[in-house]
Image: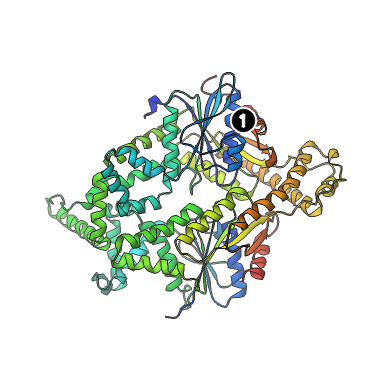
């Protein structure tokens, strides 16, 4: 099958605005694209789904996003993802098992019987590597086989709202480790396919977000190195929540301001120079040498998703 | 380590990433030392600037003295998370060949990757050590960044699961109990089949790796269990205090709320304080045009918008806070160039003062 589903992976330090960016990116893609778009929140809080206006934002199954044509969203969790993964592997294992020849409803019954077994179920909880492979397996499946609900149309774009730094690296590293551990067999093949998809520069884009602050920038850099080691595509850095810079006016009478506000003025004046230095230091050690996109800080009293998505559309796509 | 031998009072500083938890922990620690308490703050991978402000140049697995006051002092333990788990294995398994066998086991490598729990585990283990050393009145735990802020309590348990023979040994063993009656025979055979299917799915190589890893890791298992029990008992103790750190922004406040609820679900006491960090002054300047003059329109307007957001948010927090925290305190912003011992101490004192207005008996010892 000649599908060209694009995978967009969004990650960065906790609290830098990944979910907001993922939701904005979906909206931007929807405005530009002719095919359906799926947002997948991996082990998330349901926030990006909430931002897109989904009331029922803890649901596993893909739901249509209201008022946005062609955008769907789902939140994947380890348990149901594992069930699907196991089912998929049984169906895949043509040489290894007889289960591939069963009808899908019988196979689902087998899956349930096996996973409901107390020992197996306890084992799935603790067994190394299975959970990450199942989560990424679901993303992989949506990219390679997934269809818009009630249709035969493949997704045009899949946006993955990935966990933050350490956990994102863990997902990919564990899956790579499964390849090394198994060496052959269906788990090996599936893990290999996942890794070759996320490494495919024609199909996968990796975005690393940061705010102009010390720790988020440091994590963005470390994260890009770890993912480079795993041979993922070169990261596109997004600088998020840039605040407007203060225009220093030496003639102003800040002594007439209340003490608290005079201090705020000082903070704002200092902040600009500091952020600039941090950002320059970050860019100096990175390739590519610039941010793909810089997004402003928008107080939540404004419609920030709307503004951000038009910026994404204008400058990213 | 068990509950009886932990003498120190525990202060938990909790919150999502990027809210300034570590600075607040340090500030609190300084204020406590000034009150005369022998205090230690435990943190993982802190910002360079903060470490410098406290006069600490390098990370170390030993507590370092930050401040000596008349009766008390502040020590800091800045942990480096990189080697934590390997160290644990080496410490528990004295036989070097055996330790290396575990460390080189392919499954163990996956465990290492998969566990976000390693950093959390390290801080918890150190925490218990310090709490039972008798050297501190108060231990402040700056909880490690993780998907869930309470992972630090769960982490020894999570790690334990990987080494828990009760589940894995049954899984690995080939002997089934001998079925007696007709129904148990049927039950037993589906059970055996289910296991067989699953084992076939994993493959022989995987199963033998698993068996090897388990055979050698008993001491690690014991150490983990001790830590798990120790921390669980301590966080639930009557004198344990917890602070939820947040920002005057929508999502961080939502997360603080969820965290406060999660604390209750863990059968811990209700959070003592919701601390909103980096607040703007509570009222707008009497003459906003002065702000425009000093910063330019765009930047000043941004601050005013931010102020509006903050006021709305704090108002709604006040309405529902009683369901997840006992009191609210707000800290003002300060510029990074003022990140030094004096500023942090001042902030810490402000924090303690606001807290004591809400809750007069914070301390175990006076």
Q: Residue at x 47, y 76 (%)?
A: A154
Where is residue B267 drawn, in percent x and y? Answer: 44, 37
Give the residue pinned by disc 1: B355
Q: Residue at x 37, y 37 (%)?
A: B228
Q: How many marks?
A: 1
Q: Nearer the viewer, residue B237 or A217?
A: A217
Where is residue B359 drawn, in percent x and y? Answer: 59, 27
Q: Residue at x 59, y 71 (%)?
A: A29
Q: Nearer the viewer, residue A110 or B122?
A: B122
Single out the residue that lies furthest toward the bottom.
A2
Q: Is residue A259 left or right of residue B123?
A: right
Q: Quadrant of the N terminus of chain B?
A: top left
Q: Is residue B214 left or right of residue A282?
A: left
Tell me which chain the residue with mark 1 is part of.
Answer: B
Q: Quadrant of the C terminus of chain B?
A: top right
Tell me which corner region of the image, top left, top right, bottom left or bottom right, holds residue A106.
Answer: bottom left
């Amino acid at each position: 099958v000649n599908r060209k589903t694009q995978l967009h992976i969004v990650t960065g330090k906790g609290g830098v605005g990944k979910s907001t960016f993922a939701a904005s990116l979906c909206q931007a893609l929807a405005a530009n694209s002719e095919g359906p778009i799926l947002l997948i929140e991996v082990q998330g809080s349901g926030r990006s789904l909430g931002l897109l206006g989904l009331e029922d934002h803890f649901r596993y199954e893909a739901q249509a996003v209201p008022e946005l044509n062609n955008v769907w969203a789902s939140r994947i969790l380890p348990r149901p993802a594992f069930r699907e993964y196991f089912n998929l592997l049984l169906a895949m294992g043509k040489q290894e098992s007889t289960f591939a020849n069963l009808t899908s409803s019988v196979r689902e019954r087998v899956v349930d019987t096996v996973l409901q077994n107390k020992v197996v179920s306890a084992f799935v909880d603790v067994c190394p590597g299975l959970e990450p492979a199942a989560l990424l397996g679901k993303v992989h499946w949506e990219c390679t086989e997934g269809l818009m609900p009630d249709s035969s149309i493949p997704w045009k774009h899949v946006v993955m709202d990935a966990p933050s730094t350490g956990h994102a690296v863990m997902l990919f590293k564990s899956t790579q480790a499964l390849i090394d551990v198994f060496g052959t067999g269906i788990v090996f093949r599936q893990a290999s396919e996942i890794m070759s998809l996320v490494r495919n520069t024609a199909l996968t884009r990796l975005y690393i977000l940061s705010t102009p602050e010390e720790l988020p920038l440091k994590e963005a850099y470390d994260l890009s190195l770890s993912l480079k080691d795993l041979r993922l595509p070169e990261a596109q850095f997004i600088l998020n929540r840039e605040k407007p810079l203060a225009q220093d006016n030496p003639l102003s009478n800040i002594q007439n301001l209340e003490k608290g506000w005079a201090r705020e003025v000082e903070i704002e004046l200092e902040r600009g120079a500091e952020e600039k230095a941090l950002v320059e230091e970050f860019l100096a050690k990175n390739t590519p040498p610039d941010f793909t996109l810089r997004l402003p800080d928008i107080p939540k009293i404004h419609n920030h998703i709307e503004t951000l998505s038009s910026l994404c559309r204008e400058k990213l796509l | 380590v068990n509950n009886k031998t932990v003498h120190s009072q525990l202060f938990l500083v909790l919150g999502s990433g990027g809210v300034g938890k570590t600075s607040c922990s340090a500030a609190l620690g300084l204020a406590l030392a000034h009150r005369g308490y022998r205090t230690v703050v435990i943190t993982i991978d802190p910002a360079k600037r903060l470490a410098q402000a406290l006069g600490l140049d390098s990370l170390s697995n030993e507590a370092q003295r930050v401040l000596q006051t008349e009766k008390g002092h502040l020590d800091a333990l800045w942990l480096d998370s990189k080697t934590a788990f390997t160290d644990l294995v080496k410490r528990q398994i004295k036989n070097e060949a055996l330790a290396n066998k575990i460390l080189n086991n392919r499954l163990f490598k996956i465990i290492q990757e998969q566990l976000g729990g390693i950093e959390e585990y390290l801080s918890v283990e150190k925490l218990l050590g310090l709490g039972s050393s008798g050297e501190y009145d108060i231990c402040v735990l700056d909880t490690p960044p993780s998907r869930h802020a309470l992972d630090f309590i769960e982490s020894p348990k999570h790690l334990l699961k990987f080494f828990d023979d009760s589940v894995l040994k049954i899984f690995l063993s080939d002997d089934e109990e001998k079925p007696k009656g007709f129904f148990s025979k049927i039950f037993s055979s589906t059970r055996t089949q289910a296991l067989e299917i699953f084992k076939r799915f994993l493959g022989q190589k995987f199963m033998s790796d698993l068996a090897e890893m388990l055979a050698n890791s008993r001491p690690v298992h014991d150490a983990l269990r001790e830590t798990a029990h120790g921390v669980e008992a301590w966080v639930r103790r009557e004198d344990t205090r917890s602070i939820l750190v947040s920002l005057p922004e929508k999502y961080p406040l939502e997360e603080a709320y969820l965290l406060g609820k999660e604390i209750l679900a863990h059968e811990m006491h209700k959070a003592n304080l919701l601390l909103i960090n980096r607040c703007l002054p509570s009222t707008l300047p009497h003459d906003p045009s002065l702000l425009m003059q000093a910063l330019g329109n765009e930047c000043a307007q941004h601050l005013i918008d931010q102020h509006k957001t903050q006021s709305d948010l704090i108002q709604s927090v006040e309405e529902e806070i009683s369901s997840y925290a006992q009191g609210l305190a707000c800290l003002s912003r300060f510029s990074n160039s003022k990140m030094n011992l004096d500023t942090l101490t001042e902030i810490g004192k402000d924090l303690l003062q606001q807290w004591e207005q809400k809750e007069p008996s914070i301390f175990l010892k006076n």
